[in-house]
Amino acid sequence: MAGERRMSILERLVGVGAQGFETTRLCAVGADITELTGAGLMLMSGDIARGSVCSSNAVSALVEELQFELGEGPCVDAYHHDRPVLEPDLATPSRVRWPAFTEPAVSAGVRAVFGFPVQVGAARLGALNLYRDTPGALTDDQHSDALVMADVAAEVVLLLQAGAPPGRLAAELEAGADFQYVVHQASGMIAMQLKVSVAEALIRLRAHAFGNDRSLTSVAEDIVNRVLRFRETDE
Amino acid sequence: MTRQTILAKTFVELADSLVTDFDVVDLLTVLADRCVDVLDVGAAGLMLLGPDGELRVMASSSEAMRVLELFELQSQEGPCLDCYRTGQPVVNQDLATVDGRWPRFAPEALRAGFQSVHALPMRLRGQVIGALNLFHIEPGEMRESDVESAQALADVATITILANRAAFESQLVNEQLTSALNSRVLIEQAKGMVAERLGLDMEGAFNTLRNHARNHNLKLLAVAQDVIDGALAPGSLAPEKRSDR
């Protein structure tokens, strides 16, 4: 029954005393309730990936980061198509859906991956990402739990943001989140280094990462830490 | 039905109501009824803060006028009001000895046949939306485990109500979320530009931007936008390295 599933989730989220509502619990509970290896909650707004609200382990964090960087993956598809996206065998899929995402994800240990849209009514927030380190489809129970979890996650995110000061992100949403600020900071720095717009700077940043087979985040970090700088004469 | 089963059933019923067309009063009445069943209280009620800023009884386990009036009185004075104002539980108040704490409410409650009263806050993250009010016919203290159960019931109801309110305005809140994220991205980009131009770290860049905003009575976001648009040269800003401790 949906009610019992929801209550099970709520009980785990509420815990002892509802004082501190940690969004990190959303992902921990998501993985826990579905009995999968990890969960991540990707936030998308204005139709672009913003980053993750939480991730339950390092591999989930990587799955989120890859989708942010590459713009493809189960969460991206689930969000765009408004329906669950299920890949029970990422290493040997019946068809390759995510040419850039697949290899790094499989290398990190992701063998099955599932994306569930996170929305309330017409408000689409992003998607919940669940993965397993062994291949195999979700059971009906796991699928149902994931659907309810995605619903609860949507409500909680909205609940938290509704309590935020106007124009600001809710503090609870920031804690444990990764909205890729370092990428935006690096874009600002590159804009000054190359005397280009910030939008152009981001393109150059991505091109450098791709051309050097590095992650967007690691190049951004090098820029911010002044280990790397772009010069106007660079390609 | 055992106490545990009743509690579990309550939770399920409350949880099932997390749909956009649920009736708040129905939900709270279920909760109030369950409190009477599970916690051996004579009466229970939920008071929520209304749009006029006053506590109003939203649901009661009893329709008896004497009980409803007891709730009504509490918009002015009583355990619910105290609980709401402090966000803290008000428990085990023996009405015969409250010593003028509630000069209107206490005698009325005694007259209605109740000996002790409790109020548990309906609260999330410091936001108090109301209080769960319990009345005992017998004097004596409520068991610690019962106080905890009552608080748990209040907590689940609070989350249910707040999440439903947020969900009801879901599109609006989602737009606010998008807007907040967009603003944040602009600020981070501007920080990068300032950091590069003035040779600062990100904290220093942020302080530089914020000081400029304050000194010129501007919003931080507007300053960030100007920097990004080229209307405000980062080189013209006064560098600020560290936050003042």
Image (tube, coloured by chain):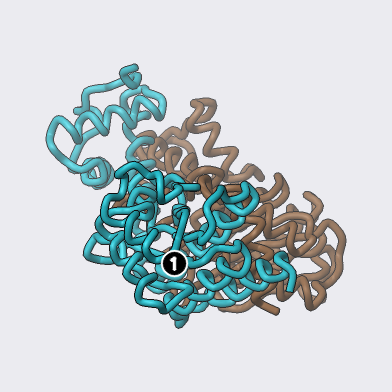
Q: Residue B19 location in percent, x, y?
A: 51, 78
Q: Residue B168 location in percent, x, y?
A: 40, 74
Q: Secondary structure at mark 1?
A: strand
| Chain ID for cyan | B
Q: Quadrant of residue A87?
A: bottom right
**Eyeballing the image, is A141 above or below B95?**
below
| Chain ID for brown | A
Specify the subunit that label 1 lies on: B
Q: Looking at the image, which is closer to me, A51 or A40?
A: A40
Q: Quadrant of residue A131?
A: bottom right
Farthest residue, direction bottom: B21
The residue positioned 52% from the left and 45% from the top of the image is A20
Q: Quadrant of the N terminus of chain A?
A: bottom right
**Eyeballing the image, is B3 above or below A219?**
below
- Report how many numbered discs are placed on residues in the image: 1
Q: Looking at the image, which is closer to me, B242 or B82?
A: B82
Q: Looking at the image, which is closer to me, A158 or B10?
A: B10
Q: Residue A98 location in percent, x, y?
A: 69, 66
The residue positioned 46% from the left and 56% from the top of the image is B115
Q: Label 1 crowding class (10 Å Cα cut-off): few <14, some 14-19, many 20+? A: many
The residue positioned 57% from the left and 42% from the top of the image is A217
Q: Looking at the image, which is closer to me, A206 or B123?
A: B123
Q: Is residue A207 visible?
A: no
**Eyeballing the image, is B89 above or below A141?**
above
The residue positioned 59% from the left and 54% from the top of the image is A14
Q: Residue A37 location in percent, x, y?
A: 78, 55
Left or right: where does residue B176 sit relative to residue B144?
A: left
Farthest residue, direction left: B216
- For mark 1, what is the residue? B45
Give, as a three-letter code, the residue at label 1: Gly
